Image (spheres, coloured by chain):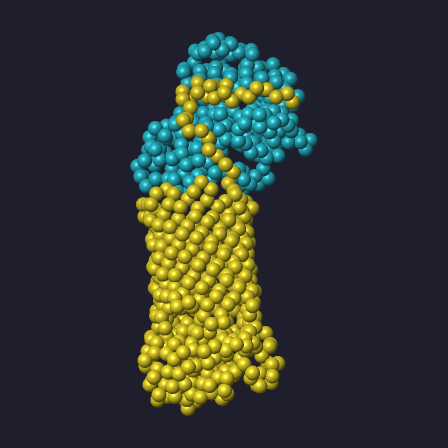
Chain colours: A yellow, B cyan
Amino acid sequence: MQLKKPIGSSLAAATCGLLGVLPAAPVAAQEAPDWEIDSSLLYYGEDNNRVTDGSLMISARRRLDEDRSYNLTLTVDSLTGATPSGAVPANVVQTFTGPSGGGSYVVQPGETPYDTNFLDTRIALSGSWNQALGDAMRYGIGFSSSDEYDYLHLGLNGRLERDFNNRNTTVFVGAAFGQDKVKPVGGTPVGLAPMFGEDDENEEDDDEDRNVDLTKDVVDVLFGVTQVLSRRSLLELSFSYGQSDGYLTDPYKILSVVDPLTGAPVPGLEDEVPYLYLYEKRPDSRAKQSLFAEWRHAFDRDSMAINFRLMDDDWGVQSQTVDARYRWNINDDSYLEPHLRYYTQSAADFYRTVLFQGDPQPDFASADHRLADMGAYTAGFKYGRRTQRGEFSIRLEYYRQEGDPSPGSAVGDLASFELVPPLTAIIAQFGYKFRF
Amino acid sequence: MGSPCELLCETDDESLAWRLARHAVREAERIDRKFSRYRKGTVVEALHESRGRPIRLDDETARLIEFGAKLWQLSEGAFDLTSGVLRRAWNFDEGPVAANTSLIPELLGRVGWQRVHWQPPTLTLPEGMEIDFGGIGKEYAVDIVADHAASLTSCPVLVNFGGDLRCTGAAPKAGAWQVGIESIESFGEAVRRIELRSGALATSGDARRHIEIDGKRYGHIFDARTGWPAPEAPRSITVAAATCSQAGSYSTLAMLKGADAETFLEAEGVQYWCLR
């Protein structure tokens, strides 16, 4: 075909004649991008050189059409630092074996024993497929996986939702199944057995047992409803039930055995570990149920979301969470979002700060602070800004967790120590998302 | 307009929403009444019954006729305001096999802008010929309603008459109006999404109206020179332009280029999306 002179200017002139005037603004149209990339770099740092985590996340979502999309997310975490071992401070020098069985560490009088050999890289990959089934129904199926040197997780999940009542009500159900493999470094300790020194003779005897992969199965089910309350308000209510079975113990956590009157550590069975510590032991099943409610409201310019969660499990842990965010839209392109969260929980039935010499041995015991009576709050903000190509955000948060520093079990010497030391952490995150 | 018409506006001001809706309905109905080929007492009917006598047109009709005459010229006769009579050979309203193509040679004797005497604002239409604003009327109505809306409010508005649409600014919250291009296989399903921040989009296609003869598909946009739709035209053409009248002209003219539709649009340097 022979190309003719473009007709654009003649057509514009003819249109001007038809309409009297042409709009000042030129056309601005573009095909909506199919790919959405979300990325973030997160720093999490606890005080007193405890845990530091650097985390890099990249997530890609592709829309195939109006009804179908898929997503892949890769996260790499690098954890370093120390975690409380579960043992309590003492007026004497304490020596512990490292989790690898190689290398022991010494804790000075009055200091909280931290397991300093904590170092890990974790890689997680997850994906999902989402599709609409007609006008009122959608489903999603996904997988999750993560790998670190002593832990492997594989999971599958699914979700189905359906709109009713002119799309003002959405009912959803979901289920997830996960299978985890735990392979403790240095073998699996026997629960409530004494911690031995590095050249432990008994280790040989236990080797067969100790190198077996331990598994943990987790099943979660969820159902809920979101209801449009008004043009500006939305309420979501959901109930979830989770059942975990298998090895739920933390193989690196121990408990101090102390004298019931003086609170002093009891002598150990060996020279390498002069005092007696027992490995913790938790039940091999846990059933959790939780109720969640969230209210979202849009104001003229800003919006807010507040949610509550009540959790209850058969270990005796009950927790309450309140989380509130307010999004202040400073202008069309940027926002500031303050965030406040408060969390409180009761201790697990088998939580002990210490075990007393002479007491009958309990079936289960753990001194893990995460199972203690405690409260925590988070306060921070997120600032986001839309640019020509995408949107970046900065999040800064302060986290503070406090348990009862001197519980009833703080007898004798123990009364002068902080048995459950408070934890302070800073969270800084930089995020960038864009579409193409 | 023969298709669903909507006006979208994101506002908290209910009275503004009503005002916009009332204006839009009033204008759409007025234009429909005035230029429809189906109604009695319209300027179209007056022309058809003029029996070759000159008719002096009102300003708005004259402007539309002038625009159509320009498109005839720019399309080298492929687009023609008088090609409506060809519908007698291609009856889309009576199912997909109602073509009687043997009528075409005879009907072509009643088609052709060169036979019309157009001395603005006076039109002399030879007896037996007809004027049909079908190819430009709806787009014109979209532009008029959008211009009206812009004079009533600075709040961005989207005017959509059966898939030909224009906005007066970007959607406030989403940043852009999300417009789907309908699949040629199944109605109501979008195969592409366009983000429109300013200007107009118009779509021509055979998805909703077509005739099949011996398994071959024919759209409803005829080349006035042959009486047939241009061969090998895309199934759907969407064009973006500052006004709906321009976008619609481009998509119709591209349809008439048949196999060369994309080459034509490419040379025009406009944004377009073709489905074949």
Q: Position of residue A86 (x, y in %)?
A: 43, 77
**Going 48% across and 34% down the picture, which residue do you hit?**
A29
**Going 48% across and 84% down the picture, which residue do you hit?**
A273
Q: In the rendered view, would you say B245 is above or below A77?
A: above
**Going 38% across and 37% down the picture, which residue do you hit?**
B9
Q: Position of residue A127 (x, y in %)?
A: 55, 56
Q: In the rendered view, would you say A19 is above or below A359?
A: above
Judge by depth and name the residue closer to the eye, A417 or A431: A417
Q: How many marks?
A: 0
Judge by depth and name the residue closer to the eye, B230 or B166: B166
Q: Residue furthest bottom?
A: A358
- Asked whether residue B192 is in view, the answer is yes
Q: Position of residue A38 (x, y in %)?
A: 49, 50
**Going 33% across and 49% down the picture, which residue do you hit?**
A328
Q: Quadrant of residue B228?
A: top right
Q: In the rendered view, would you say A402 is above or below A428?
A: below
- Asked whether residue A315 is in view, the answer is no
Q: Position of residue A159 (x, y in %)?
A: 51, 58
Quarter of the picture containing the C terminus of chain B is top right
Q: Residue furthest right?
A: B214
Q: Quadrant of residue A83?
A: bottom left
Judge by depth and name the residue closer to the eye, A340 or A273: A273
Lateral position of residue B121 relative to residue B96, left or right? left
